[in-house]
Image (tube, grey):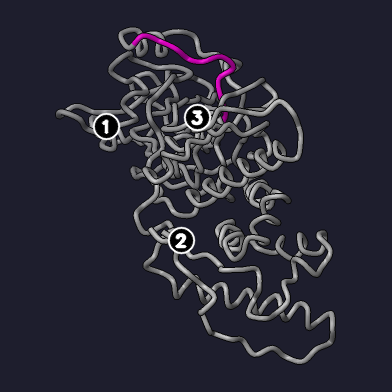
Amino acid sequence: MGVIRKKADDMDGGVDFIQRLEPDMCVKILGYLEDPTDLVRVSAVSSSWREFVISNGLCKEICQRMFPETSNFDHIVEIRNMFEPTKRDDSAEWACRGREHRAYASLSRCLTSLTRKNCILDAICASSTDNYPEESIKNTLEPSDRVNQRASYWSSKGQTDPTVSETLIYELAANLCLITEVQVHPFQAYFQLDFPIYSSRAVRFHVGHPKVPLEFDNDDRDHFLDVHEFSDDKFVWTHSSPEFPMAQENQLQTFKLPEPVFAVGGILKVELLGRVQTQEMDGQYYICIANVQVVGIPLSPAFDIEMLNEHRECTLKYYPGSVNLLLPPKSLELQSSSSPSRFHKFSTSLRTWEQMILNTFRAAGPLIADDDDSDYEYLD
């Protein structure tokens, strides 16, 4: 694909505001950009702009502003080049900043280009299970409440106290996921009198990571996780959602998070708060769930993390060769030779923008934009 590049730093005879203004002022101006992909486009306008964006870590800054959880990335490892200089000289510092720029630029591009999908990979454990394995948490991975002519759902143990809560814990499809909503379907017991719906009173969600890696043999995994005592202290929860009321309705209910959550660690906990339905045969309260889905963007195989400690610090692993495996073919706007007019329009607006800034300082007259694109070339 062709990449559109500026031939020189000369902006159609105008003045480059990055070269004329104080660095702090330039950082403040570019800080008004809210979309990380716009900052990537800025870095492609000229070599001086690219150097400024990289040396000031602007891609990293905007990612951390949009997703505060990324501030826990202690450092970046670029897998195609594992060499990390030991000397902190100028070239090593520039290499480090360049590595961060590439990683955060690719991360922001993935977060704004990928289609959202169900991010649950597997079920880990439930705080209780009434009849194992017939009513295992594994059943909540099925979108239907009937599988092979049999009811498919998870059921808690019965309780006489309706305030007793339950938890379901799931493994996400990647150690890094951007989650926008969680969907939960309470189970309606169509085989019981009056077709009761065993929903919880409310629901809350937590994301985090295990304190130690969860490793089980495939033959023992289901049995171990369902029948052993649940221990919440095996995990570190880094984000908790607000409490959402759950309707006692037989449908997949959507709980949209106030802001997208950057789930670092690959673990989701569904906290089912309180009980509303008793079972006629024993008069006890139960919670039954037919299906759970997590809507978001898994970032594997392009990104992974390595947890360093229980204080949420981690290493971001970046696999440049895998980015294009995630992105749809037409999402690479800066690398697509099919959209030169769009890039030229953006670059022209930037030249107009910077000249207007300078004119403001100089009290100059209005600027008439020049649409001539003779300064651009396409590099294979």
Mark 2 or mark 1, whichever is nearer to me: 2
Task: Answer with mark 2 or mark 1, whichever residue precedes in sequence.
Answer: 2
Q: Which mark is residue 379?
A: none
Neighbour class for label 2 at 10 Å: few (<14), some, many (≥20)?
some
Mark 2 or mark 3, whichever is nearer to me: 2
Q: Which residues are magenta?
A: 207-217
Task: Answer with mark 2 or mark 3, whichever residue precedes in sequence.
Answer: 2
* Residue that numbered label 2 is attached to: 3
**Contact flag, marks 2 and 3 (Cβ < 8 Å):** no
From the viewer's perspective, tell me whether residue 78 is left or right of residue 3. Answer: right
User: Residue 327: x and y, percent?
Assistant: 39, 49
Q: Amino acid at mark 1?
A: Leu
Real-space Cα distance between discs 2 and 3?
Answer: 35 Å
Compare residues 182 and 180 and report the one nearer the observer: 180
Q: Is residue 271 visible?
A: no
Q: Residue at x 58, y 86 (%)?
A: 370
Neighbour class for label 3 at 10 Å: few (<14), some, many (≥20)?
many
Q: Amino acid at mark 2?
A: Val
* Residue that numbered label 1 is attached to: 193
Q: Residue at x 36, y 44 (%)?
A: 252
* Residue that numbered label 3 is attached to: 266
SS at circle 3: loop
User: Residue 167: x and y, percent?
Assistant: 50, 25
Compared to residue 375, the image places residue 163 above or below, namely: above
Q: Residue at x 49, y 33 (%)?
A: 80
Real-space Cα distance between discs 2 and 1?
Answer: 67 Å
Location of the N terminus by quadrant is: bottom left
Compare residues 256 and 37 and report the one nearer the observer: 37
Compared to residue 214, the image places residue 104 above or below, namely: below
